[in-house]
């Protein structure tokens, strides 16, 4: 940093005035009016009342008063960086998405990592899921892959999201605790939601205390679709694999780090990129067709399930490199707006009821958070390809349609404005759908324990011990004994040894019966 050496003049009260000159521009108001004195408000006499007429004072304080915008309702604390995605080889057999058409194609990217439950000022190394949101500025529009560092989710249907987040965030009467410690409400909700059990195994594992953002995996979680130029659809799960490897801290370190340096993860990313040690992830895809989906043990629309990598290997199709920190945290990291419904031709949705709800939620919340339907006018959110539409007006409109035409169809041949493209335009896959309107959960979503068990037994002994310790510690924060016992009753359906360790750690007087929610597997339903 260069030290400011502008000419200094002492004011009448001994205050410091730095005066413009040389390469120092003149300070102005927002209206561009040059400012003579930025140290003193306009008064009647040196010791008199301040005048309402002082437009400089009023503008300055008015602007300051409105500096804050609402923090994100979830994932409030995060840190972003710029980079690019490089395609390894054309994927035209699978998708017509432009970014996957050419080997070596580089697509600009912005990534924001986050914690979920803590507020904007919370500590980085909290035990929490990490958001892994990627915006890819492709030549056919922005594609957002809004993922997490855990491949599954707590709930199967978006209608439960407000309940999940209410239960995880501070309790409304007392306003604490922050997310990093468990508490009655959280474990109450979770223990009443057997569908959460697979995710519980992951969040009680070391995955939720990553060493830094650079050592995390990322997952798109839902099953999406790739669609090629012939209209053929292939199901896909997206993965980000860190080239740095996967590393976590232990709980003891996490607690100390949060006290000593609550900014540990954001500092790590800033420092690594600043030092030229650019973190990289490879994009992996698991692809499969209807035949596989029909015979797979679980429903591919159920976001609480993975497709094991032994069953369908992950194919690496490109790499993401983060090589530039932000110039302005607020303008970029805070104002960036990711949305699952931002897809490009060649990428499509499935009927995963969690994804369908997310597609509504992000746009809706961002209107409130950023205050205007024109948040795509903010450079971090604007596409980097040409864009032409007839949206106009609203708060802070920067790109109103030019000239006479702001509608179509229209008859003006001199300046008709943009028109549809049947060839290049986005077309939703014409999936046939039929059924009764029902407010119901599919029976194919009902096995909540098998994959939780698979995850637990896939862990090393040390990792299993960490899961048991974390469950014991976090459940010890649930003050109501019945809630602890209810959680142990679920653990009994996952792994007997784990349930016993946790029950002993919690000092349960007697072992509860296994939870009755052990429902039939898909194979039982379709023998
Ligand atoms: C924010 C991931 C489920 C609503 C985020 C962010 C990520 C994320 C990474 C942070 C985006 C950023 O950095 O700006 C996920 C994943 C989910 C999930 C992976 C499940 C698989 C849901 C559901 C809903 C939801 C079910 C609602 C129905 C929101 C909202 C925000 C958010 C409202 C704040 C967005 C903003 O203010 O910009 N989510 N989420 N999420 N998520 Fe989710």
Image (cartoon, helix red, strand yellow):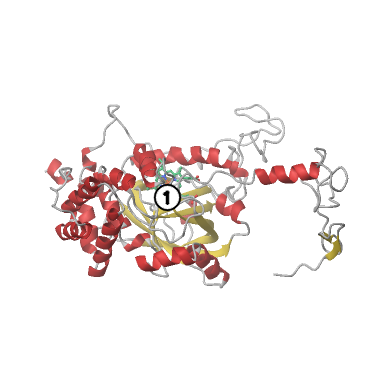
Vertical relation: 479 (above or below) 439: below
Vertical relation: 372 (above or below) 170: above
Residue 316's x, y, as percent? 38, 63
Where on the picture, by quarter, is residue 239?
bottom left
Residue 408's x, y, as percent? 60, 29
Residue 367's x, y, as percent? 54, 38
Vertical relation: 252 (above or below) 295: below
Q: Quadrant of the C terminus?
A: top left
Q: Residue at x 33, y 63 (%)?
A: 206
Q: Nearer the viewer, residue 376 or 196?
A: 196
In this rendering, position of residue 275 left or right of residue 12: left
Q: Nearer the viewer, residue 94 or 131?
A: 131
Of all residues shown, which one is farthest toward the left?
A: 527
In this rendering, position of residue 264 left or right of residue 429: right
User: In terms of secondary structure, where does tag 1 sit?
Assistant: loop
Name the residue beneath numbered marker 1.
117
Where on the picture, by quarter, is residue 452?
bottom left
Query: Does the rendering let one see residue 364?
Result: yes
Of all residues shown, which one is farthest toward the front?
A: 47
Please rate how many residues cluster around mark 1, counting C-alpha atoms within 10 Å: few if below 14, some from 14 to 19, many from 20.
Answer: many
Residue 421's x, y, as percent? 54, 38
In this rendering, position of residue 492 left or right of residue 406: left
Q: Residue at x 55, y 49 (%)?
A: 336
Q: Residue at x 62, y 37 (%)?
A: 418
């Amino acid at each position: 940093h260069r030290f400011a050496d502008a000419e200094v003049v002492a004011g009448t009260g001994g205050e410091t005035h730095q005066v413009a000159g040389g390469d120092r521009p003149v300070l102005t108001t927002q209206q561009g009016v040059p400012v003579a004195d930025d140290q003193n408000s306009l008064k009647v006499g040196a010791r008199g009342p301040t005048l309402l007429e002082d437009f400089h004072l009023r503008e300055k304080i008015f602007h300051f008063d409105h500096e804050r915008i609402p923090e994100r309702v979830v994932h409030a604390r995060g840190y972003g960086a710029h980079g690019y995605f490089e395609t390894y080889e054309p994927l035209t057999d699978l998708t017509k998405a432009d970014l996957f058409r050419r080997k070596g194609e580089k697509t600009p990217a912005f990534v924001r990592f986050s914690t979920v439950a803590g507020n904007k000022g919370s500590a980085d190394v909290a035990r929490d899921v990490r958001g892994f949101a990627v915006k890819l500025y492709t030549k056919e529009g922005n594609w957002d892959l809004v993922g997490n560092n855990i491949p599954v989710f707590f709930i199967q249907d978006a209608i439960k999201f407000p309940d999940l987040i209410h239960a995880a965030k501070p309790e409304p009467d007392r306003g604490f605790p922050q997310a990093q410690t468990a508490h009655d409400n959280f474990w109450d909700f979770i223990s009443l939601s057997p569908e959460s059990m697979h995710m519980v195994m992951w969040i009680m594992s070391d995955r939720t205390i990553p060493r830094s953002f650079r050592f995390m995996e990322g997952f798109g979680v839902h099953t999406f679709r790739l669609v090629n130029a012939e209209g053929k659809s292939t199901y896909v799960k997206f993965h980000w694999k860190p080239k740095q490897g996967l590393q976590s801290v232990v709980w003891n370190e996490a607690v100390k780090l949060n006290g000593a340096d609550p900014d540990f993860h954001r500092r790590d990313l800033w420092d690594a990129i600043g030092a030229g040690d650019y973190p990289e992830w490879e994009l992996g895809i698991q692809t499969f067709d209807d035949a596989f989906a029909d015979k797979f043990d679980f429903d591919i629309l159920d976001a609480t399930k993975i497709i094991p990598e032994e069953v369908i290997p992950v194919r690496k199709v490109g790499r993401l490199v983060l090589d530039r920190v932000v110039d302005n945290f607020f303008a970029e990291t805070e104002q960036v707006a990711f949305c699952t419904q931002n897809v490009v031709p060649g990428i499509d949705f499935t009927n995963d009821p969690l994804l369908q709800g997310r597609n509504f939620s992000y746009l809706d919340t961002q209107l409130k958070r950023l205050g205007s339907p024109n948040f795509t006018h903010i450079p971090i959110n604007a596409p980097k390809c040409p864009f032409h539409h007839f949206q106009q007006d609203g708060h802070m409109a920067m790109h109103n349609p030019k000239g006479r035409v702001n509608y179509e169809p229209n008859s003006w041949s001199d300046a008709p404005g943009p028109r549809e493209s049947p060839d290049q335009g986005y077309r939703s896959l014409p999936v046939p759908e039929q059924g009764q309107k029902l407010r119901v959960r599919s029976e194919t979503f009902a096995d909540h324990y098998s994959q939780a068990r698979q995850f637990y037994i896939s862990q090393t002994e040390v990792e299993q011990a960490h899961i048991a310790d974390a469950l014991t510690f976090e459940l010890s924060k649930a003050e109501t004994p019945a809630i602890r016992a209810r959680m142990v009753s679920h653990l009994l359906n996952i792994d007997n040894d784990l349930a016993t360790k946790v029950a002993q750690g919690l000092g349960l007087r007697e072992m509860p019966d296994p939870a009755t929610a052990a429902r039939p597997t898909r194979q039982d339903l379709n023998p």
